[in-house]
Image (cartoon, rainbow, N blue to C red):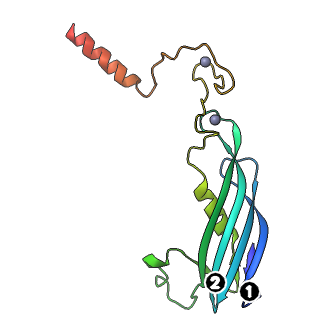
Amino acid sequence: MRINIFDIPEEGLEQQFDLPVAIENNTKPDTASVRITILRFGKKVLVDGSVKAAVSLTCSRCLNDFYYPVDLNFREEYVPVDETAPEGDQELSEDELDVGFYKGEEIDLSGIVKEQVLLEIPMKPLCRNDCQGICSRCGADKNVQSCNCKDDHIDPRLAPLAKYKELLNQRKE
Ligand SMILES: [Zn+2]
Ligand SMILES: [Zn+2]
């Protein structure tokens, strides 16, 4: 989604558009519906946006696909890149971190929308907070069926510890 800054009238510009957002490891591209208000002060541009999307994710416990609702607001300020400045002079000072840059007359809003959506996606998505996951022995989805596997197996991450304990016991004997 590109906006020409000279298309932004004095009173501001309101726009609504759909944007495909592809999440990593996600086979289906999802669509975000975006609503933005753009104000321009000389060459400085202020963008207020709201993004709504249902992003399809894979649950990290049961591996089922589910839709994760995203509903967020963002505000970003854009200033033109100073193409005459010598390199190195454009490093961001700390209070400029929320500032985006545009080149020429166009601002591309796709990047900021995708970035905002990605920030909302959990690292380990869960289809629901109490997802029971998959039985590590028989592979049954424990959300829909119970299995008869006993839960007495040792967590593989703790196995070295168990071995160590065994060694200690042997030494005592
Ligand atoms: Zn799940
Ligand atoms: Zn099982």
Query: Which image quadrant is residue 110 in?
Result: bottom right
Q: Quadrant of ligand 1?
A: top right
Q: Which residue is mark 1?
A: 8
Q: Quadrant of residue 34?
A: bottom right
The amino acid marked with disc number 2 is Val
> For the image shown, how many numbered marks are present on the structure?
2
Q: Tell me the quarter of the image containing the C terminus.
A: top left
Q: Name the amino acid type tagged 1.
A: Ile
Residue that appears at 48% across and 15% down: 152
The residue to which callout 2 is attached is 45
- Up/down of 27 relative to 157, above or below: below
Asked which secondary structure carries label 1, the reply is: loop
**Is residue 170 left or right of 55 when viewed as pictured?**
left
Please tell me how crowded label 2 is: few (under 14), some (14-19), or many (20+) other residues with Cα within 10 Å: many
> Considering only vertical position in the picture, is 142 above or below 81?
above
Question: Do tag 2 and tag 1 residues touch (Cβ < 8 Å)?
Answer: yes
